[in-house]
Image (tube, rainbow, N blue to C red):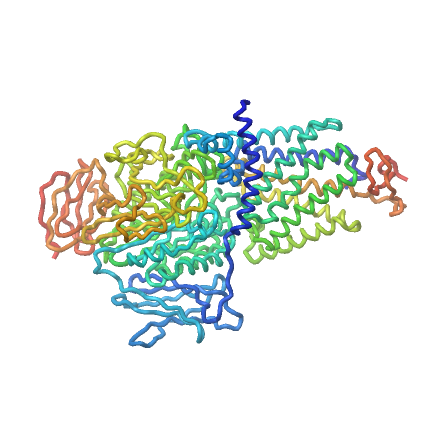
Amino acid sequence: MNLRSILTLSCAAFAICHGTAAQSDAKRKDGRALLSIPEVASKDVICFALYTVHDRTLKLTAQLYPLPKDAPRTLRLEIERSGRWIEVARATVIEQGWTAPFRVANWDDSKTQRYRVAHGSAATYEGTIRRNPVDKDEIIVAGFTGNSINPAHGGDISRQDIIDNVKKIDADVLFFSGDQVYDHTRHYAAWLKFGRDFGEIIKDRPTLTLPDDHDVGQPNLWGESGKISTLPGAADGGYAQPAAYVREVERAQTSHFPDPADPHKVGQDIDVWFTNLNWGRIDFAVLEDRKFKTGPAGRVPKQGPRPDHIQNPDYIPASVDVEGAVLLGKRQLAFVDKWTQDWRHADMKVALSQTIFCGGAHIHGSANGRLHADMDSNGWPQTGRNQALRALRKGFAFHYAGDQHIATLFHHGIDEYRDAIWSFCVPSIANLYLRWWEPLAPGQNREPGAPEYTGDHLDGFGNKVTNYAAANPEKQPGGNLLNTRAAGFGVVRFNKKTREITMECWPRNVDITNPSSRQYPGWPRTISQFDNYNPPSWGRLGELRFDVENPVVQLVDAATGEILYTVRARGRTFTPAAPKGGKFVINAGANAPDRLIARDASVGDDSRTVSLR
Amino acid sequence: MFLSMPSDRSLVLLIRLGAFLCFAGWTWQHLYWEAPYGILLWHDTTYAYASRWGISWEEFVGTGAADGFVQKWVSRVGWLYLACAILSLTVRKGAWIQMAALVGGSGLLSILAYTKYLAANSQPPMFFEHGGQVLIPLLLVLAIAVGVRHRITVGTAIVAVILTFAGHGSYALGIWPTPAGFHAMTAVILKTEYQTTRAFLHVAGLLDFFVCLGILVPAIRRQSALYAAIWGLLTSFARPVAGMSLGLRFWGADHFIHEALLRAPHCLVPLYLFLLWYRPRQAGSHESDFATMPSADSTLLPINPASANGQTR
């Protein structure tokens, strides 16, 4: 043992003792994240309200503080018409979690309406149900993840910058991808705090809050269709908290979602909430990439210090792609398949889920060093990952997600690089746990001047990914600062006119409307909707000229009958991309691909004129 | 049941077994899985000390491409646990170096309990419930050095049981948030619904506190210790029983067996107390038969002199 090692050992031992003492001091100074359920006056019992409108159905959930025993258990939803409040629905309070879910069918989404939720004679909470922005060229979706409230990570710093920025850009939809709550035992108290922090922007626009692992009270989540998890860390699959707790969390965060696409419950009577939200002619698939996923413990060979972590760089990726391991699951894949073919009232499609379909980081936070692969990511199981991407690319879906604690921009590949969808993983609101995208070898096919970490890579599972940006945090502990920990949020602009998708990645506490404000390196970036399924090896069929605007076009493999994709074309012309050497059936229609256009189309065909009137 | 009082040798063997299994379980956790020290090391203060020694952050925590000193040395802590497991078997009276090393083993377990405590948002029961594990090496040393029936040895064992059961009881009763695992294991093993599980845990939590009190009351201390030993055994084996499955690799044994082993003190320390306090029923025996043993082990505890001499009257 050399002197340096001895010094290091001594240093480590001393640091352990003194560091923890310092932590105690810090705790005394800053306190653990303050989390309490405040007592409020009866006029303030409604904390906040979340809503969505889909297919002319309004679903709104009012979140209450605890009601006194003698207080009424019914809430009213009222709409302002000609200066008067008209009751349109009533809801009974569910005491476990204190929510009141409203559902109003035949909602007129063609006009903006003021609403208020009322309890008794004293309490009201007002907001705005927006008109469906079907005629708006650009739909803006603000994206968030990882809402740590722990002072150690800067989580106690005000969210006012986010509130101000969302108001300035007047986002059409808010998307919280997960970990809105980090407290593993007090979701209700933390959810109320979330409402106090973000209610001001949530009350006036459709909001999607996807519960992730920490929300349901565990560090990682492989739901395994509702199994009970008993292994510390939960890598054996399933839910660690009692089902009643999980149901309460999901009720608070998702009961205002459009009705689930396939409402059958999973194990322990836990509901599902995967669905779609069509808003402003953007069709959002809301996916649960945790609920059905198999836990790795005991299923895959051990490759590292945790059952879900792979540290052995020489392992064979195929060895962990075990038979029977599930990612989205059959029910959800069936939903996605159907969703990609349905282009009624939609110009573009977006998949929203908790996390991205690859291992999106190499170095993980707690001084644990390089991690070759993390099975908490959707890079595993590889077969499930590829099934999901194959399904999503059939609708040219753009993927918007979070969870990774590091913002990244990937173009995914299955059989070849860049043959599937793009994904944008947004940075954490306040970053609990640091990660870095730092491949050992420079990426291939990088853009000129781009950092070496960009370009074509294989992730830790051998999945093909092309990185375009990564907002890495600083390399040593960043104290209480938000932005040294690469905190922030995302903004995605979906331009229906140009069919362009512009991704923005902003740090905290900047005015994003100020031209001098800078995004994280690599952003903004604009792609075409059609980049979400444009394999480099493909060619082009002959141009199709239509007599209607924006028809829906579907390409089918003539040999197998498999639908390759369905998409709404832009304008009156469309040149389908297709694999070289094959024969293809083309279907098209004004709103659905219900007319046969060609039986044996192939790459290099002449253009043709198609009448759909 | 025993026909005669257990010998000192068998009582020491029991404690020895508890210490060995506890260290062996943690050795497996350290060397095969992951040591839980990350929460102690990833801090500004850690970096400050590293830099004071002229060591860069990258050298200290690793560059990403290679492990740093911290990762290398943390992984080596597992070998100390292995050494302690072996010493638990080899330590004998007069082997002062081995005894000192085992006291150090208690220190290692204290650090480990502290990391668990920090990871559990500084909930005191998380630290206390490791009391049985932290104290068992010390208990072994005391049993060998001053005698298995010595007041200090017995007192240490009582403290270990009280800490463990008070910690568990606090969680089971919900004085601090009940860990998810408590619910999960109960629901899986007993196939109970949430309300029943809650009720079961409340009852178990109450009994935990009864144990803490009962073990101090001479009239019921044996029954309390026996219950604690049985409950300690059941809760330790609840991990593999709930988690293992024929469908898993190695039936999941590599994930769950050590979880039971490292909790061996939860069963074996109260079992030691029960056997220590065990009195075989014999005709004509009554409380006045008890006397204070003068003795080799210097104990001042009342025991049955006949049994101690291997005779009956």
Q: Position of residue A564 (x, y in %)?
A: 23, 44
Q: Given the current orientation, which residue lies at the most extreme top position?
A: A2
- Does residue B1 appear to the left or right of B312 in the view shown? left
Q: Position of residue B155 (x, y in %)?
A: 75, 43
- Does residue B8 appear to the left or right of A138 in the view shown? right
**A111 or A247, which lies in front?**
A111
Q: Is residue A304 above or below residue B172?
A: above
**A303 or B142, which lies in front?**
B142
Q: Position of residue A134 (x, y in %)?
A: 23, 60
- Does residue A102 appear to the left or right of A20 in the view shown? left
- Quadrant for the N terminus of chain B in the image: top right
Q: How many marks?
A: 0
Q: Is residue A302 above or below residue B125?
A: above
The residue that appears at 42% across and 38% down in the rendered structure is A374
**B189 or B106, which lies in front?**
B106
The residue that appears at 25% across and 47% down in the rendered structure is A396
- Quadrant for the C terminus of chain B in the image: top right
Asked whether residue A572 appears in the rendered view, the answer is yes
- Does residue A604 appear to the left or right of A304 in the view shown? left
Asked whether residue A331 appears in the rendered view, the answer is no
- Give the quadrant of residue A131: bottom left
Q: Is residue A247 above or below residue B36?
A: below
Q: Position of residue B13 (x, y in %)?
A: 72, 33
